[in-house]
Amino acid sequence: MKHILTLLSALLLSPLAETQAADARKPNVVYLFADDLGWSDISVHAGGSIPTPNIDKLFAQGVELKNFMGWCVCSPTRAMLLTGRHPFRVGTGPEVGGELAKDETTIAEGFKANGYRTGVFGKWHNGEDPDTAEYRAAYAEAFAAMPNKKFKGGLGVNEHGFDEAWVFYGGGADYFTRRTAGGRGPVSWWHNREFRAQDAGYTEEFIVQHAMEFIRENKDRPFFCYVPFHLVHAPLQAKEADLKDVDPKVTDETKRTYAAMVQALDKNVGAILGELDKLGLRDNTIVVFTSDNGANKDGSNLPFRGGKHSVYEGGTHLPTVIHWPNGKVTSRTWGGLCGALDMFPTLMAMADLKMPETRPLDGKNIWPALRDNAASPVESYYWAWHNEDAIRTADWRMHRFFDRAELYDIRTDIGETKNVADANPDVVKTLTAKMNTWSDSLGAALTHQPPPAKLDAKPAPEGEVLEVTVTVTAQAKLNDRLIVPVASFDRSQFATDHIEYDIAIAADSLRRGFYYSPLKGNDSKAITINFKRGEGIDQFGREQSMSPEVQGGPGVWEHRIIGLCSSAPGSLPRHGLVFKGGKPGTYKVYLDNLRIRHADGSTTPIWASGKDTRFKKIADSELFTSAAVRSVPASEVHP
């Protein structure tokens, strides 16, 4: 009888023992990352007109982070999550692109070092496709008509701590072919380092399928599952089955497609959460749902101002929830300031894991504050974007432009409708100091602010210099422009890089009405000027687009230095001079020592002598004539 009772006791207690063992196991982490999803694209938020029942339920079950920040485009936000470091420190941002360096420690490496199985399923966008023979062949075929286009392979996601990966590498990929934006280039779809161009189907179906397979395969061990969806990023492409589920009252084709994609995202979230439920893993899984930036013009960021490509609240304030029943992270909201930067240290702390050795983090561990419903340890978030930089604290958001500041009381004006800078000069002063501390610590080469005085240098022309001559006719008006490219540069530049050069004019030259600028575009008819109004501020505080005169007069050389943050990361393929109409006559302008200055003080030349000249003859027009570029001895330039 004693043996029977012992056996019955063992049978009855074994499920409890299994449950206790499961509870004692380190929690899993599933990070669900929507792409371009706006604050009120989901129906849990006021104004959300697209039904998202699965996401809404998750927000009701978990803790909604009411003040969660990212970047205003996707690559920087992803880098913030992966490294816990500001995008400028890791070679990405403010724009998309950049290759995450191998010596950056990632969140995947942190979990892997603690015995977790790690996987990523979806859009990477923190580096280029890996360099394999199969992909090189596909690349050469896709760009056969552009033989000079160089392939630059990336490390691949597995080099950043992921054991299992089903990913594509670009942005804005076709959902049915996984091609890069606009159908250019080869298919980008990979299983680890295996190029999978042959796989056919809708991208999101692959993402969800492989993410759930990963969860099933690792149900008996702790795992970190990163799911960066492609939905709802452009191009707007929905499956017919998803379109049929849209409310028939929505008749506009664009709105129907967008709604179908949002609803498809919701179904996919539901499928992954359902898999966790089916496997009995939900209670001990930390689930994070968020977006990478605000919605584009087709989505909704209400009640915030702006959206994607804007550092107003609508571009960076992201819908976010964390759910973890075993950790009692359930059914409430938390208003502390936090964001993607803080997820690496926070999730490691939530799982009670040892942080790996990393470079200095910008992100903070918010777990104690989140757990105890206390104040956030995060003091501020900082962005730089084209012609402005911005800071967000718990109480304020300030935007700094070349010629003004905008200040908003976020406590009472979340829509940033009333600029109260003039009424709060002390706040502006305090936040400006904080912004300077941020930018100085990052080494940010701000395009809309003068570079630090320590970077100024004396002109040093020698040997050959570049001479650019253009005649302006009487027909050319003030708004007319002639762009004269003179050099090219095929390397990337980063948010910490400056451009510098020596410049002078001849004695018989017009003095005003021209300026240097980096240029984008390879088609001579579609070249765009980087240094627009409010950007391209030199060390003397002058806007280049306003054509500042060379100090000292004709024949006197001047050195200029200007931040390149606004166009980083990536390449500025052309460099040249922009000439304006409005006053007839001839310009004769000299350049030398055109180069990129890096954060460590080293330089990379763009134009140093005649061999660096890249000029195609420009035909005369009724506005500008006699455009010519040549190298001449520096001795020809004199007062």
Image (cartoon, rainbow, N blue to C red):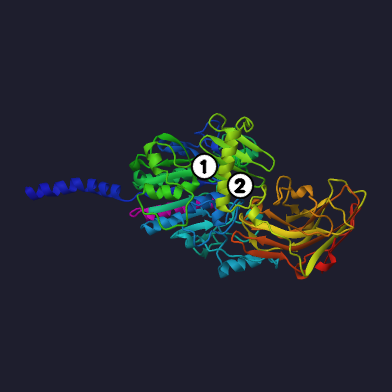
User: At x 57% / y 37%, what residue is drawn?
Assistant: 397
Image point (55%, 68%), residue name: 132
Extent of the magenta region: 200-222
Query: According to the image, label 1 marks what residue?
Result: 380
Residue 500, by quadrant, is bottom right
- Please, what is the three-letter code of the amino acid marked with disc 2? Ala
Q: Which mark is residue 136?
A: none
Q: Position of residue 171 (x, y in %)?
A: 59, 53
Binning the other alpha carbons within 10 Å of mark 2 as few (below 14), some (14 to 19) or many (20 upward) gives many
Q: How many numbered badges does the structure rendering display? A: 2
Q: Is residue 603 above or below residue 238?
A: below
* Location of residue 33 in the rendering, given as x and y in whole percent from the top left corner: 50, 47
| Residue 205 shown in magenta | yes
Q: Is residue 567 visible?
A: yes
Q: Which is nearer the eye, 60 or 550?
A: 550
Q: What is the CA distance from the residue labelled 2 to the residue labelled 1?
A: 14 Å
Q: Main secondary structure of the magenta part?
A: helix
User: The C terminus appears in which quarter of the rendering?
Assistant: bottom right
Foreground residue among 21 and 619 = 619
Q: Is residue 492 above or below residue 403?
A: below
Left or right: residue 333 versus residue 128 is left
Mark drawn on residue 384:
2
- Residue type at mark 1: give it: Ser
Viewed as shown, does residue 618 lie left or right of 359? Answer: right
Report helix, strand or loop for mark 2: strand
- What percent of the width, then of the height, locates residue 621? 90, 55
- Magenta segment includes 355: no
Report whether residue 239 is seen. no
Q: Nearer the viewer, residue 631 or 306?
A: 631
